[in-house]
Image: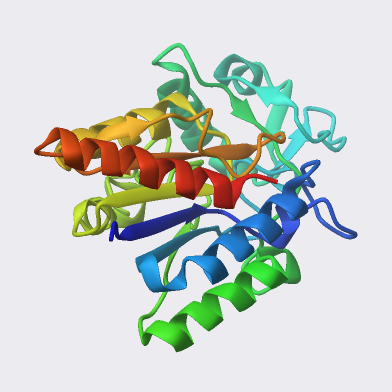
């Protein structure tokens, strides 16, 4: 039987389309209901379960509470801020002593030519309801732990208030004095171990970095990515389409079995 390692990205209340969520995504709650059902159905086939949690303070460089306009007015959610905007005082950190550090950060962020700071509403603050796992998914994980005697690993990301961290593997601009922001080689090594299949899903954008990381992980495992389109929990807003990484097959029979397993996994994830 093909074994599964399940990697779930940010399945938290603040991203659900339910009352009081800070950043609701249309369809997200239904996606997590399906994912919870998948875990319940496939419990005996899941060898390992890792969940990432977007984890923040109430004030940080990527949230509205950190910023103000030059005249002191509040900054609206989803505002894009560049280094030049801070240099000319169009936008300023509320703690003005951080201005030089913020300018340096924004320059580093923009250096690759692809990223600009986006100011988000306050969300996923540690210790709050919004930070918690979606309820049915949390119960399905607890049931999996009870049934298997294993523990779901929960990986916190975003704890450094002076850099964004969308990816579980590293921050947008790693900090030399904070290992939490640097390449998470322990997580990468864990996801490379064992099972025939690595199934990835959750509530997050699949950006170039994470897609590249998934591809690199596949190569490290001697694996191929088995379709983003066919195997998915859903495709709403920030939803990360499920990627299934197949361990290298050594014969055509094994490859055919892998293909059939992919179809079964896909069927269990579809609405």
Q: Residue at x 53, y 74 (%)?
A: 141
In which image quadrant can residue 136 be found?
A: bottom right
| Visible residue check, residue 162 | no
Whole-percent x and y of residue 188? 25, 50
Q: Nearer the viewer, residue 4 or 73?
A: 4
Residue 267 to residue 259: above or below: below
Seen as rendered, the residue at the extreme front is 253
Q: Give the quadrant of the N terminus.
A: bottom left
Residue 264 to residue 129: above or below: above
Q: How is the image coloured?
A: rainbow
Q: Nearer the viewer, residue 14 or 9?
A: 9
Seen as rendered, the residue at the extreme left is 250
Q: Residue at x 65, y 18 (%)?
A: 85
Whole-percent x and y of residue 56? 59, 58
Whole-percent x and y of residue 25? 77, 42
Residue 138 to residue 228: above or below: below
Q: How many marks?
A: 0
Q: Nearer the viewer, residue 116 or 150?
A: 150
Q: Residue at x 78, y 44 (%)?
A: 27
In which image quadrant can residue 111 be found?
A: top left
In the image, taking residue 230 as reference, residue 139 lies left or right, namely right
Q: Residue at x 53, y 51 (%)?
A: 161
| Visible residue check, residue 217 | yes
Whole-percent x and y of residue 198? 34, 49
Q: Nearer the viewer, residue 267 or 17?
A: 267
């Amino acid at each position: 039987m093909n074994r599964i390692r399940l990697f779930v990205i940010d399945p938290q209340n603040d991203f659900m389309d339910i009352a009081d969520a800070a950043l609701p995504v249309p369809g997200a709650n239904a996606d997590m209901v399906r994912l919870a059902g998948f875990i319940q159905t496939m419990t005996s086939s899941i060898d390992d379960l890792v969940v990432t949690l977007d984890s923040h303070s109430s004030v940080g460089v990527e949230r509205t509470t950190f910023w103000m306009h030059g005249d002191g007015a509040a900054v609206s959610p989803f505002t894009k801020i560049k280094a030049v905007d801070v240099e000319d005082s169009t936008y300023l950190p509320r703690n003005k002593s951080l201005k030089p550090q913020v300018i340096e950060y924004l320059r580093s962020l923009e250096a690759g030519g692809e990223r600009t700071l986006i100011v988000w509403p306050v969300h996923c603050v540690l210790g709050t309801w919004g930070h918690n796992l979606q309820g049915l998914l949390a119960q399905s994980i607890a049931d999996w732990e009870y049934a298997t005697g294993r523990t779901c690993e929960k990986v916190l990301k975003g704890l450094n208030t002076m850099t964004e961290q969308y990816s579980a593997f590293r921050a947008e601009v790693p900090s030399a004095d904070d290992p939490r922001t640097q390449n998470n080689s322990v997580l990468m090594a864990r996801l490379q171990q064992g099972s025939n299949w690595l199934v990835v899903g959750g509530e997050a954008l699949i950006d170039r970095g994470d897609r590249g990381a998934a591809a690199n992980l596949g190569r490290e495992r001697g694996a191929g990515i088995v379709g983003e389109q066919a195997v998915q929990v859903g495709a709403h807003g920030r939803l990360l389409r499920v990627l299934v990484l197949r361990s290298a097959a050594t014969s055509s029979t094994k490859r055919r079995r892998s293909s059939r397993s992919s179809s079964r996994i896909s069927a269990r994830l579809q609405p």
